Image (spheres, rainbow, N blue to C red):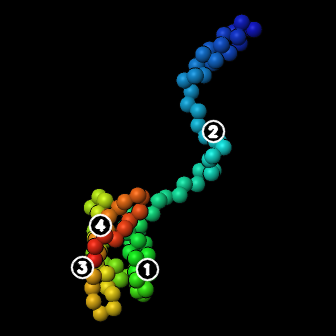
């Protein structure tokens, strides 16, 4: 009886390295809550709102239209008062920056 249980125990130990270890709590883990990064369109819109704030313009998210993102470049149409502006942005040093306004 002892020999059989010893063989089973040794067999289980031999298989142990092949078992998947799951749900190990790591010290830097936040309990499984994942925070999604904002979308690229949202980041560009936020950059445009910051740009407008710097120019003392009352701009809202609804004033940003025709937003197009192509890699590290983006364009958008802003409704500023009674006119429209076409704004060109580029992604540089992990932030979107306005590079040209038409």
Task: Between label 1 and label 4, give the one nearer the viewer.
Answer: 1
Secondary element under disc 1, as helix, strand or loop, is helix
Q: Please, which residue is most extreme toward the right here?
A: 2
Q: Which residue is mark 4?
A: 74
Pointer 4 or 3: first along the chain: 4
Pointer 2 or 1: first along the chain: 2
At label 1, counting other C-alpha atoms closer than 10 Å, the crowd grade (few under 14, some 14-19, many 20 or more) is few
Pointer 1 or 4: first along the chain: 1
Q: Which residue is mark 1?
A: 54
Q: What's the distance in space between the residues labelled 2 and 3, CA to CA?
A: 54 Å
Can residue 60 be seen by looking at this rendering?
A: no
Pointer 2 or 3: first along the chain: 2
Q: What's the distance in space between the residues labelled 1 and 4, CA to CA?
A: 19 Å
- Percent position (x, y) of residue 97? 37, 68
- Percent position (x, y) of residue 38? 45, 63
- Percent position (x, y) of residue 17? 58, 22
Q: What's the distance in space between the residues labelled 4 and 3, CA to CA?
A: 14 Å
Residue 3, numbered circle: none
Would you say 9 lies left or right of 70 here? right
Q: Which residue is mark 2?
A: 24
Secondary element under disc 3, as helix, strand or loop, is loop
Residue 102, numbered circle: 3
Task: Between label 2 and label 4, give the one nearer the viewer.
Answer: 4
């Amino acid at each position: 009886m002892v020999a059989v249980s010893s063989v089973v125990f040794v067999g289980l130990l031999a298989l142990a390295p092949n078992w998947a270890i799951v749900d190990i709590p790591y010290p830097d883990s936040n309990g499984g809550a994942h925070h999604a990064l904002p979308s690229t369109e949202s980041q560009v819109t936020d950059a445009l709102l910051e740009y407008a704030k710097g120019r003392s313009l009352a701009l809202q998210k609804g004033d940003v239209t025709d937003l197009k993102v192509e890699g590290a470049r983006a364009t958008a149409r802003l409704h500023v008062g009674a006119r429209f502006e076409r704004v060109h942005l580029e992604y540089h040093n992990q932030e979107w920056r306005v590079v040209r306004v038409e």
